[in-house]
Image (tube, rainbow, N blue to C red):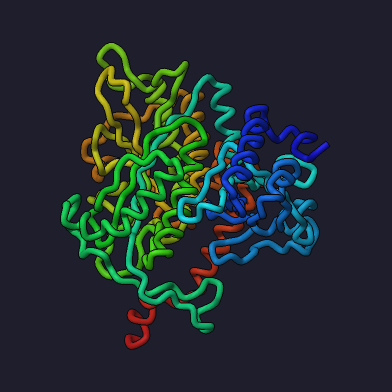
Amino acid sequence: MSLVERAGLHSSEQQEAARQVLDRVAKDGIQLVRLAFADQHGMLRGKAVVAEELASAFRNGVSLTSTLLLKDTSHRTVVPVFTAGAGIGLKALEGAADVVMVPDPLSFRVLPWLPDTGWLLCDVVYPDGSAMPFCTRSLCRRLLGELAADGYAMFSGLEVEFHLTRLLDPKLAPADAGQPGTPPDVALLTQGYQYLTELRLDQMEPILEHLRRAVQALGLGLRSIEVEYGPSQVEFTFRPAEGLLPADEMVLFRSAVKQVARRHGYHASFMCRPRLPNVMSSGWHLHQSLLKGGENAFVGSGGEMLSPTALHWMGGLLAHAQGCAAFTTPTINGYKRFRPYSLAPDRAVWGRDNRGVMLRVLGQPGEASTHVENRVGEPAANPYLYLASQVVAGRAGLAARLDPGPSADTPYETKAALLPATLEHALDALEASATLRAGFGDAFTDCFLRIKRAEVARFNLEVSEWEQREYFDLF
């Protein structure tokens, strides 16, 4: 009996999908299949197997080193894996032991830019098939299952901003290698500040057309391509979908955009605020509502715009906004976006169709599309953790029947809890949150905190240009 059969890792639907994928691979002459999982940062890692090995991967998965789940954003392993319990109290990870990634056959796609190459998202388990606490996709699926047990399904859509530039120098000289390496030199595609103008859109069309074709060929639910306010900044929006699918689409979208852009001599960055003159911050707005019996549970009645379910859900998102920020805004850079009197929030408030609030409510009384837009996220966030944080906080709001308070019509003047000013503050709030710890689990929470604090520690040891400019001549 195979590992997948023995541990019950595939449903009957997945078993049938695996048979169909194998048939398609043989029929279409696919030579290679990339198997990828999302690490703690939402970056796709994995291996590529030749077509003849795919059936074996479906049965028994593919092994890889567990340290891939223990790295910071410089790709350094941040725990002492060669000590007892790997430094985090997990004997199974001692000595950089293997874990297994199991392909999800329902996620199969063929790469439009490499038609003889397939692509499969994977979940990570221990070698005996038991759940691995650091697999972010599995964690998100578990929390969505708990929401389903309450009678609800998550319905969410993506609105993603990023910077798209021309690659001038990829910095591949040996001196540029390192952890991390030297970032590339780039040039703008537009000077910006002409929001949604056709002229700017046409200037960027050559690469945007390549990206559009790839994204649609992958079957992602693309709705629109828009020129954003900042120089060389664009936004892609996607149709809302149920459950785990939006998170899957986000990791595939980011990876596809970066690969296609690079192949055509461009550079795509989902970093919130690149250190380029005059650029603007990018956000990732997560539109969300709950379905109950297939109907939108956020729609109000009796002339009310929002249902009690919507209000309590928002109450949870606001009450736990500080701790959730570690997942919605997980980089040091992302906190440079939170500033007053801008298009980004700086405090935990909600409002009706107001772009200065954290939670922007869209819709009209009785309108089936009524939903909440969370504007706090950055495009570098791990999609599974972003989505999971909404589920944990929202469910807590439903359970405690939390009141989100009145609509904030002047969001930057309304008295409310401020969002964290730094990643350090967000991590402290996460550590102090019994609600988030209970939802994500102690093992995951403690390891995530350790990984992110390792990044903060490295940042604090760096001598920045600001420090050099501020102090070198003065003192």
Residue 334, position as x, y percentages in the image: 40, 56
User: Residue at the spot x=41%, y=18% of the render?
Assistant: 295
Q: Is residue 2 above or below residue 421?
A: above
**Who is closer to the viewer here, 313 or 226?**
226
Q: Quadrant of the C terminus?
A: bottom left
Q: Nearer the viewer, residue 235 or 380?
A: 235
Q: Residue at x 19, y 57 (%)?
A: 200
Tell me which residue sits at (68%, 33%) in the image: 10
Q: Is residue 258 visible?
A: yes
Farthest residue, direction right: 1
How far across and how far down the image is residue 465, in percent?
38, 78
Q: Report whether 438 appears left or right of 287.
A: right
The quarter holding residue 469 reads: bottom left
Instruction: Give the number of callouts.
Output: 0
Q: Is residue 224 above or below residue 13?
A: below
* The quadrant where residue 303 appears: top left
Residue 418 shows up from this direction:
no
Locate residue 452, reporting x and y percent. 55, 58
Q: Residue 70: horizontal and vertical position, in percent?
A: 64, 57
Q: Is residue 389 left or right of residue 10?
A: left
Q: Measuring 83% from the left and 36% from the top, which residue is drawn there?
A: 1
